[in-house]
């Protein structure tokens, strides 16, 4: 068996501690060799507060996993690639499409792996749903993705700043599943975006696509959270529940598990495979839909929002 790959985890916040650290710890493919964060750390793991220092002092670490917010991520990814490190990007892969294209070109030129991750595509029922839909005609699809920003991003004002994406931070998870499972691509035709009076990014969005596909995103839902994709086909209805982890066919459970715990371990397994095979995986389809929504969206101002 190959020796574990050493990885440096950059940005030790909620998502890193809740998902990345346990996924790395449980994998025989990986060794968490260092962290870099201005505030967070992982017990027993060498910690740096400056990324340039990490790169200079730890040439033995070939892989960097970036868990930073989208806006500062490009500079770190560029520095890592220029230092000869493979890079794994938390979703969304960047603040703009152009900067991710630049990272792709840099990784290719230096023969390094770049992996733009979409954790929701690794949900238990996504692959079975894709297989079920492959030879069916889709007549309608609707996404309902409603959750509580106070629960998932407590006090994180950056999500409402330019580049933070607002409700598209979770909504892009739904779009990553949609672009994976539909047998034919769709494109956005219109959007209504609700912006709090005191914020720069939307807190809710309604989207329309070709192919009779629609989406309803909202970051104000309290209580039970809703992560559903319902699809009507010429062979009957199918639905993904629990963020893509449970597949229902004709209203009955058909595949998957009612848990999200498998998503990040699957991402790290994929990254190990890519590094060892010398390949990259950068699909920007979900991010294209978000960019189109922000271009075509009709702005609606709603009540101010405070954490």
Image: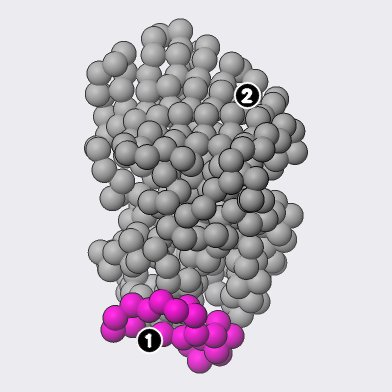
Residue 115 placement (x, y as % from top left): 53, 58
- On screen, residue 142 versus residue 95, left or right, reads left
Give above or below for 40 relative to 285: below
Q: Magenta segment, which residues?
A: 37-59
- The reply to whether the magenta stretch includes residue 58 is yes
Which corner quadrant holds the N terminus?
A: bottom left
Give above or below for 231 relative to 9: above
Give the labeled residue for mark 2.
208
Residue 48 placement (x, y as % from top left): 46, 86
Packing grade of label 1 (10 A; few <14, some 14-19, many >=20) is: some
- The reply to whether the magenta stretch includes residue 116 is no
- Identify the main secondary structure in magenta: loop
Give the structural element (helix, strand or loop) at label 2: strand
- On screen, residue 145 versus residue 202, left or right, reads left
Q: Nearer the viewer, residue 256 or 15?
A: 15
Give the structural element (helix, strand or loop) at label 1: loop
Give the labeled residue for mark 1.
46
Q: Quadrant of residue 251?
A: top left
Q: Residue at x 37, y 40 (%)?
A: 222
Q: Are marks 2 and 1 in contact (CB under 8 Å)?
A: no
Q: Nearer the viewer, residue 295 or 176?
A: 295
Residue 53 placement (x, y as % from top left): 55, 89
Q: Residue at x 64, y 76 (%)?
A: 79
Residue with the most extreme bottom position = 57
Residue 156 placement (x, y as % from top left): 50, 60
Packing grade of label 2 (10 A; few <14, some 14-19, many >=20) is: some
């Amino acid at each position: 068996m190959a020796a574990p790959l050493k990885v440096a985890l950059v940005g030790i916040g909620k998502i890193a501690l809740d998902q990345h650290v346990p996924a790395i710890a449980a994998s025989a493919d990986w060794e968490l060799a260092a962290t870099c964060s201005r505030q967070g750390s992982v017990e027993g793991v060498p910690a740096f507060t400056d990324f340039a220092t990490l790169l200079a002092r730890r040439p033995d670490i070939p892989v960097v996993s970036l868990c930073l917010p989208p806006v500062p991520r490009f500079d770190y990814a560029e520095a890592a690639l220029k230092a000869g490190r493979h890079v794994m990007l938390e979703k969304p892969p960047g603040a703009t499409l152009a900067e991710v294209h630049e990272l792709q070109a840099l990784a290719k030129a230096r023969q390094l792996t770049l992996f733009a991750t979409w954790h929701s595509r690794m949900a238990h029922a996504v692959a079975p749903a894709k297989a079920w839909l492959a030879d069916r005609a889709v007549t309608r699809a609707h996404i309902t993705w409603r959750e509580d920003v106070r629960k998932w991003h407590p006090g994180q004002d950056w999500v409402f700043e330019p580049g933070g994406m607002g409700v598209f931070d979770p909504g892009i998870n739904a779009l990553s599943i949609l672009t994976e499972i539909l047998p034919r691509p769709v494109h956005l035709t219109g959007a209504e975006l609700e912006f709090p009076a005191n914020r720069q990014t939307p807190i809710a969005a309604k989207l329309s696509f070709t192919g009779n596909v629609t989406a309803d995103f909202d970051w104000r839902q309290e209580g039970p959270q809703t992560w559903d994709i319902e699809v009507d086909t010429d062979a009957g209805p199918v639905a993904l529940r629990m963020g893509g982890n449970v597949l229902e066919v004709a209203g009955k459970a058909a595949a998957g598990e009612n848990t999200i715990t498998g998503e990040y371990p699957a991402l790290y397994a994929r990254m190990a495979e890519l590094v060892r095979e010398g390949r990259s995986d950068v699909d920007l389809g979900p991010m294209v839909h978000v960019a189109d929504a922000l271009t075509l969206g009709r702005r609606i101002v709603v009540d101010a929002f405070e954490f």
